[in-house]
Amino acid sequence: MPRDGGAGAPGVDPRQLWLTSDQPRRGRKPAYSREAITAAAVALADAEGLEAVTMRKVAAQVGAGVMSLYSYAPDKETLLNLMVDHVSGELPTTKTPTGDWRADLKAIAHLQRAHMLRHPWLPAALSTRRILGPNTLAFLERALAALRPTGLDGTAKLEIFAQLTAFVAGHVAHEIAQATTARSPDRATAEARYLAAVAADGHHPELAEALSAPGRPLTPEATFTRFLNRLIDGLDSD
């Protein structure tokens, strides 16, 4: 019987998921649609986090019985795939590459960061292998077009996009965690005092030197841009 499954849930055949209609071919018109159910799940995740997304809660959001949802998403893993692709539809895909592939990749990464900050559950949802749906594939197409001037083969281009996405997801997850810490001044102060004490103990000269260096802009945007520049500027196009 279908149930709320974790990452190990089998899901469905991707052709069945993305290349067929979610509406029954015969019989009475359904009261719900896969689109409406997915949108309800996304709203729940945006408001309460990914852990709050269960088939029972999503059913309550749309006013359906739990069992009726399984004809649209047989398990939670399938629902997560639907959710990821649903929000991927927000990403712009029609931008023509400039020919400067590094600049274009950086622009793509900034779009991904803003997108993940709008949906803070996305980094966790992307941490396991996902079936690429139509919206995700459209954004991938934009990234591959941006990489055309590199002359890299298809596998290398796909690897670069995967590497970029993983970097953005990891950075955003850290950024969200840091923001949570910043809302606790006592904790932040305690951590700063601890590092200062360690740096002054004489056993960590490299750390002491690093902490004494002139500060750089620490806004989330500036920090992300520095890290991104190091990643993209260091990519090899050979």
Image (spheres, helix red, strand yellow):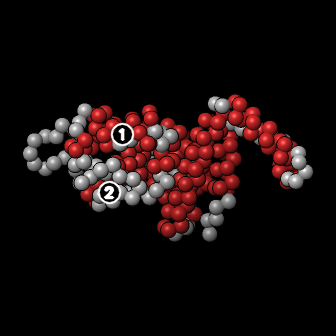
* Residue drawn at (85%, 47%) of the image: 199
Q: Residues within 10 Å of mark 1 (few under 14, many from 20)?
A: many
* Residue drawn at (67%, 49%) of the image: 227
Residue 134 in picture, x, y percent from top left: 36, 52
Horizontal placement of 170 versus 121: left or right? right
Kind of residue at badge 2: Gly
Residue 48: name its quadrant.
Answer: top left
Secondary structure under tag 2 reads: loop
- Residue 14, above or below 119: below
Label 2: which residue?
Answer: 11
**Disc 1, disc 2: CB below 8 Å?**
no
Secondary structure under tag 1 reads: helix
Screen quadrant of the C terminus: bottom right
Residue 110 in picture, x, y percent from top left: 57, 44
Residue 16: name its quadrant.
Answer: bottom left
Horizontal placement of 177 versus 84: left or right? right
Residue 186 in picture, x, y percent from top left: 71, 31
- Residue 153, above or below 133: below
Total labels: the figure holds 2
Screen quadrant of the N terminus: bottom left
* Residue drawn at (35%, 42%) of the image: 54
Is residue 134 visible to us here? no
Q: Nearer the viewer, residue 31 or 141?
A: 31
Kind of residue at badge 1: Ala
Mark 1 and mark 2: span between their CA atoms?
16 Å
* Residue drawn at (64%, 55%) of the image: 232
Q: Nearer the viewer, residue 123 or 237?
A: 123
Q: Which mark is residue 163?
A: none
Label 1: which residue?
Answer: 41
